[in-house]
């Protein structure tokens, strides 16, 4: 059974000339046969499909169907989603939409996977699924979890402020203090006053000596 479902996912509608609806109908038919396509079979299928490059077009659709059919697979699915983060699932636009839908469907179990996303992708995810933000912040604010998260993730969640933004005013304040260094230069005129005083004193001495010479001559 696993090979059948894997083969269905290997069909490329454009390449093979098979309408996408027929492919999805084939997947649906498999899920209807619960006695054949058990949760063990589905786990085996998903385990193999997640390793394919590129990821199959219907992969996230099948993941969502698996959760709907077998809710007890949720922990296994979290492992699949974590592997998708490592594969940079956001680079596959169609699969990324299904990935986000799966995160929403499986909360709060999915919070651990959400927090593994790089900050830019985490921000995008929370903007697209706003209902996840408040409970995720509450989850991440727990001391044992918060201490394990990168600061960049905490900034996206608004749990801590961006240190770069807060440090900018301090830098500009330091720059404005530079003019104070020019104050000692204002003391230069005092030196010239002293020099002027010394010059006038020497002039007086010269005049005194001349008057003495004239009195002696007379």
Image: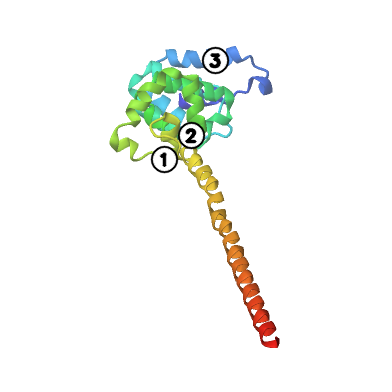
Q: Measure the C-alpha gap from mark 2 to mark 1.
A: 9 Å
Tag 2 and tag 1, C-beta contact below 8 Å: yes
The earlier-in-sequence mark between 1 and 3 is 3
Question: What residue is shown at x 29% (from left), y 37% (from top)?
Answer: 144
Is residue 36 among what the camera can see? Answer: no
Q: Measure the C-alpha gap from mark 1 to mark 3.
A: 40 Å
Front residue (pair 146, 111): 146
Q: Residue furthest bottom?
A: 217
Q: Measure the C-alpha gap from mark 3 to mark 2.
A: 34 Å
Q: Position of residue 87 (x, y in %)?
A: 52, 36
Q: Which mark is residue 94?
A: none
Kind of element beneath mark 3: helix
Question: What residue is shown at x 53% (from left), y 31% (from top)?
Answer: 89
The earlier-in-sequence mark between 2 and 1 is 2
The earlier-in-sequence mark between 3 and 2 is 3
Question: What residue is shown at x 58% (from left), y 32% (from top)?
Answer: 54
10 Å neighbourhood of mark 1: few (<14), some, or many (≥20)?
few
10 Å neighbourhood of mark 3: few (<14), some, or many (≥20)?
some
Residue underneath mark 1:
150
Kind of element beneath mark 2: helix
73 left or right of 81?
Answer: left
Q: Which mark is residue 119?
A: 2
Is residue 200 among what the camera can see? Answer: yes
Q: Position of residue 161 (x, y in %)?
A: 42, 34
Residue underneath mark 3:
24
Vertical side of 18 occupied by 124: above or below:
below
Tag 3 and tag 2, C-beta contact below 8 Å: no
Kind of element beneath mark 1: loop
10 Å neighbourhood of mark 2: few (<14), some, or many (≥20)?
some
Front residue (pair 208, 32): 208
């Amino acid at each position: 059974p696993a090979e059948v479902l894997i083969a269905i996912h290997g069909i490329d509608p454009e390449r093979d000339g098979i309408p996408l609806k027929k492919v999805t109908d084939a997947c649906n038919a498999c899920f209807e046969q619960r006695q054949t396509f058990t949760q063990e079979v589905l786990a085996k299928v998903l385990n193999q499909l997640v390793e394919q490059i590129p990821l199959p077009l219907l992969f996230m659709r099948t993941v969502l169907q698996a959760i709907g059919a077998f809710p007890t697979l949720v922990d296994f699915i979290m492992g699949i989603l974590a592997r998708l983060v490592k594969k940079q699932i956001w680079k596959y636009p169609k699969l990324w939409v299904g990935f986000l839908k799966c995160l929403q469907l499986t909360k709060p179990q999915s919070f651990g996977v959400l927090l593994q996303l790089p900050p830019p992708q985490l921000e995008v995810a929370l903007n697209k699924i706003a209902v996840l933000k408040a409970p995720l912040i509450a989850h991440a604010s727990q001391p044992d979890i918060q201490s394990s998260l990168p600061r960049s993730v905490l900034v996206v969640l608004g749990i801590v402020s961006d240190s770069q933004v807060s440090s900018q005013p301090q830098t500009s304040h330091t720059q404005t203090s530079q003019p104070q260094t020019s104050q000692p230069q204002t003391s230069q005129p005092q030196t010239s006053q002293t020099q002027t005083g010394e010059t006038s004193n020497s002039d007086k001495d010269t005049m005194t000596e001349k008057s003495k010479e004239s009195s002696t001559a007379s």
